[in-house]
Image: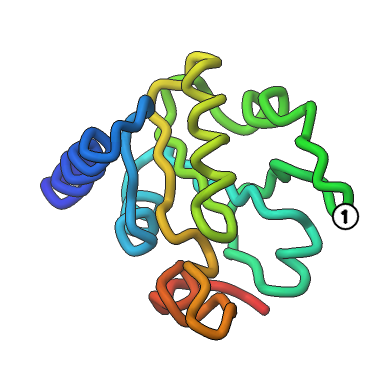
Amino acid sequence: MGALTDILKLAKSRGEELGLPYAGALTPAEAHTLWKEAPGSHLIDLRTRAERDWVGRIPDAIEIEWQSYPEGARNPHFLQQLKHQAEVGDLILFICRSGARSHQAALLATQAGFGNVYNVLEGFEGDVDARGQRGKLGGWRFAGLPWLS
């Protein structure tokens, strides 16, 4: 359990450095460790169904779209769907494509009373490279963590 405590402390410190109003920020590898080893933790994949179908899925992650495709409208049922999957005190890890939507979800969840939420930095695909492509600079997939095509 010491490794989990260390990861949470690091994520909290990182979050404080970034000025985040939620519990903290995790690397993909840290998020994977917490998700698999911390009792009652949830990995929430916020990407659209189209993104998951075209780019890949994280096995056993809870899938709740933050936005619809192709409209890009925010999911008006997000909090209701989150409350159906997790309790307010649960350890919740949000992941999206690059870390932007998961940041927004962490903000909203915190405002709604979820106090133990974390953003997975880099997301599933990481940042864009010099050629404008994702998947080669960070992210869940680049880190070699479990995913399905």
* Number of numbered discs: 1
Q: Residue at x 50, y 28 (%)?
A: 107
Q: Residue at x 47, y 22 (%)?
A: 110
The relative height of residue 79 versus residue 71 in the rendered view (above or below) is: above
In-image side of 51 versus 141 (left or right) = right
For residue 122, what is the image quadrant? Answer: bottom left
Could you tell me residue 80's position as x and y percent? 71, 23
- Viewer-closest of 5 and 129: 129
Q: Residue at x 43, y 72 (%)?
A: 145
Dot 1, how many residues are within 10 Å of its Cα: few (below 14), some (14-19), or many (20+)? few
Q: Which residue type carries mark 1?
A: Pro
Could you tell me residue 138's position as x and y percent? 41, 72
State the residue lying farthest toward the front.
130
- Per the image, the residue denoted by label 1 is 70
- Viewer-closest of 36 and 118: 118
In-image side of 144 versus 47 (left or right) = left
Q: Residue at x 78, y 57 (%)?
A: 49
The relative height of residue 90 versus residue 133 in the rendered view (above or below) is: above
Helix, strand or loop status at disc 1: loop
Figure coloring: rainbow
The relative height of residue 14 versus residue 80 in the rendered view (above or below) is: below
In-image side of 42 versus 10 (left or right) = right
For residue 9, what is the image quadrant? Answer: top left
The relative height of residue 90 versus residue 112 in the rendered view (above or below) is: below
Could you tell me residue 13's position as x and y percent? 18, 39
State the residue lying farthest toward the bottom.
131
Placement of the C terminus among the 4 image quadrants: bottom right
